Image (tube, rainbow, N blue to C red):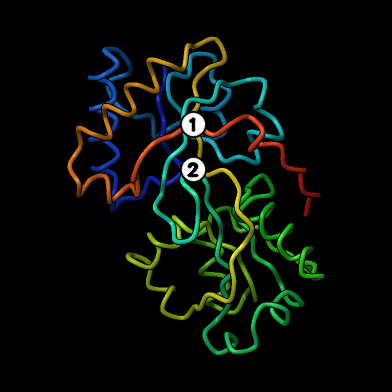
Amino acid sequence: MIAALPMYDRPENRAAHDAFYAAFREALGRGPDALDRDTAYDETWAHPDLLLGQICNLPYRARFRDRVTRVANVDFGLTDTPAGYYHSVFIVREERAAQGLAPAALGTFAYNDALSQSGWGAPLATLAKQGLQVHSTMRTGAHVDSARAVASGKADLAAIDAVTWKMLQAHEPAVAELRVVGRTILSPGMTFVTAKQNDPAPIRAALHEALSAISAEDAAAIHMHGLLTLPDAAYDIPLPHAP
C-alpha cells in the first residue's frame, strides 16, 4: 500500500503535509505509516495498491482516467477561481513586464513538463485564444526551475501553477526578479485519487475529517481551504499538442 502527496510538497510545508496525512490515516483507520517521498510521482499514480495520491488533470486526462478513481478536489482559495479549480500565472522578468504577454511569447517559453496542465496545457490554450503561440521552448522539470530560468534570462516566459506561485513568493529568492503579466484559463486543480478498485467514499470522508482535524496553520501551509468533488465533465478538456 502506498500514499503520496507530491504535487505541493516542499521543505517548508513538509510537516504540514505529514500532519494532514497522519490525521487522514487515523480517520480512515488504515494506511502506510508515512507518505512516500521516494517513489517518482508518476509511478505512484500507476501503483496497483495506491491508497491516496494526487494528480494533475492533464496526465489524468491523457493516461490515467481509466486507471485510477477520483476521490476529491481542493478549494485552494485562489482569487476569482471557483473551488476545485486552479489557473497559472504568466511570468516575465521585471524589466519586461510593461511590454505584457505578447512580446514574451515570441521568445523562449520555459515549461516544467509536457504532461503538466499548469505549465504547458493551460498556457498553450490561453495563448491560442489570444492569437499567440509558443515559438521556442525549454523543458525545466519543475515550476521552480522554470521561474529561475526566466529570472536568469535563460527563458523569456513561463506559466506557474497559482498555488505553487504563492509558495514561491514566500520562499524562492528568484521571484523578486519576476512579475505576473497574465493568467491562464481555469481547469480542475490537483485531484486526490486512489487505485481503480478502491471505494472512494471512505477515503473522501477521511480527507474531510483530516482537514477539519489539522491546525489552521497547517491547512494554510498546504493551501487547503476545503474539499469537494467535481463532475466527470469538468475533465473533458482537449489534450494539448506536444512541445
- Estimate the spatial distance between the alpha carbons at disc 1 and disc 2, rounded to whole Å: 7 Å
Location of the N terminus (image quadrant)? top left
Residue 202, position in %: x, y? 38, 15
- Secondary structure beneath label 1: loop
Which quadrant is the C terminus positioned in?
bottom right
Marks 1,2: beta carbons within 8 A:
yes
Looking at the rendering, which quadrant does residue 35 occupy? top left
Q: Position of residue 210 (x, y in %)?
A: 26, 29
Residue located 19% across and 32% down the image: 213
Could you say where residue 129 lies in the image, as x and y percent from the top left? 77, 64
Three-letter residue code for mark 2: Gly
The quarter holding residue 183 reads bottom right
Q: Against 184, is 225 above or below?
A: above
Which residue corresponds to mark 2?
84
Image position of 46 with respect to 144: above or below? above
- Label 1 is placed on what type of residue? Thr
Q: Which mark is on residue 106?
A: none
Q: Nearer the viewer, residue 16 or 44?
A: 16
State the image coordinates of residue 196 (x, y, percent, origin top left): 57, 15
Compared across the picture, whether 31 is left or right of 156 comes to: left
Residue at horizontal 71 percent and vertical 72 percent from the top: 108
Q: Residues within 10 Å of mark 2 (few under 14, many from 20)?
A: many
Q: Which mark is residue 229?
A: 1
